[in-house]
Image (cartoon, rainbow, N blue to C red):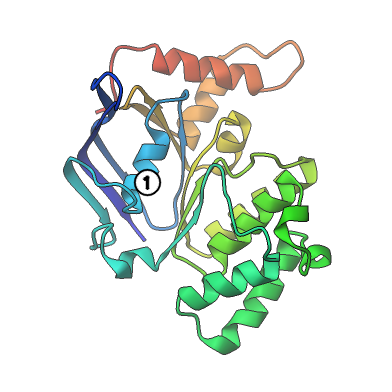
Amino acid sequence: MEVVFDQVNKTFVSSFARKKVHAVVDLSLSVKTGEILGIVGPNGAGKSTLLKMLMGFIRHDSGTILIGDKRPSDPEARIQMGYLPENPYYYDHLSAEDLMKFSATTSGMVKQDIKPRIETLLKTLNLEHARKRRLRTYSKGMTQRAGICFALVHDPELIIFDEPMSGLDPLGRKLVVDMVLDLKKKGKTILFCSHILNDVERLCDRMAIMDKGHLKKILSKQELMEKLDDKPAAADGSETNILENIFLDTIESEVAYE
């Protein structure tokens, strides 16, 4: 499912000082069907605002947003989306199994498809042992994985993850990385925000860098790898510091992406 942002703007007015905050400024971007796009930037860059506009949670002030050929306000577009928020909160008296049944039912899934889908996701994200436990007993990482199950149970074509690796231990991160790569093989379109640059470099076909509401640059995987090759190796042999330098060099540039 293709996603298009065309000259999109969003401004908020603070309730205290009545000052205008330009959250997203004249942003144009397209995401192809089956592509994984990582959106990175400092706090307040406009990443979450962009995703909320895409899902129709908030309205953009001007410009055009299309999901396939539909607007974010169209229920037919929304039913094709799966969303994991940055700070998920669910009814904590439910179990992971209850949570997915609720999502599947409200998404209009055929009844006989629900149970096999739940079984598959519980196994994929290693939650089978805790399927009947109430969410209030879950760790942060387990809650995060339950939230991913909740987002994916209806097999959406467009998947939107806001900080999907938050709170995950190394095993949890590996499970999610493997799952995302499998979703790509199935032709799903994936957008996600992350502060973990190594995950973006590993998973994404392209990386969009935002700062102060502006889209500063888009790097393809090949361009990112070339930049990594051009940078001197970090003292500990990792790519983390190199990626951070590439990111900082980009947001400090005065030229926005066109």
Q: Is residue 49 visible?
A: yes
Q: Which residue is mark 1?
A: 52
Residue 170 lies left or right of residue 56; in this view the side is right
The quarter in which the C terminus is drawn is top left
Image location (x, y in percent) of residue 18: 23, 22
The quarter in which the N terminus is drawn is bottom left
Q: Which residue lies at the image location 24% right of the left edge and 20% below the top edge? A: 19
Element at label 1: helix
> Mark 1 belongs to which amino acid?
Lys
Residue 124 lies left or right of residue 99; in this view the side is right
Image location (x, y in percent) of residue 244: 56, 19
The one of 210 and 134 positioned closer to us in this rendering: 134
Q: In the figure, 166 relative to 68: above or below?
A: above
Image location (x, y in percent) of residue 73: 26, 60
Q: Which residue lies at the image location 32% right of the left edge and 65% below the top edge? A: 77
Q: Quadrant of residue 208?
A: top left
Density class for disc 1 (Cα within 10 Å; few <14, some 14-19, many ≥20) is: some
The one of 127 and 170 positioned closer to us in this rendering: 127
Q: Which residue lies at the image location 79% right of the left edge and 67% below the top edge? A: 128
Taking the view exactly as shown, the residue that stands out farthest to the front is 16
Q: Is residue 31 visible?
A: no
Q: Which residue lies at the image location 51% right of the left edge and 21% below the top edge? A: 227
Residue 146 lies left or right of residue 204; in this view the side is right
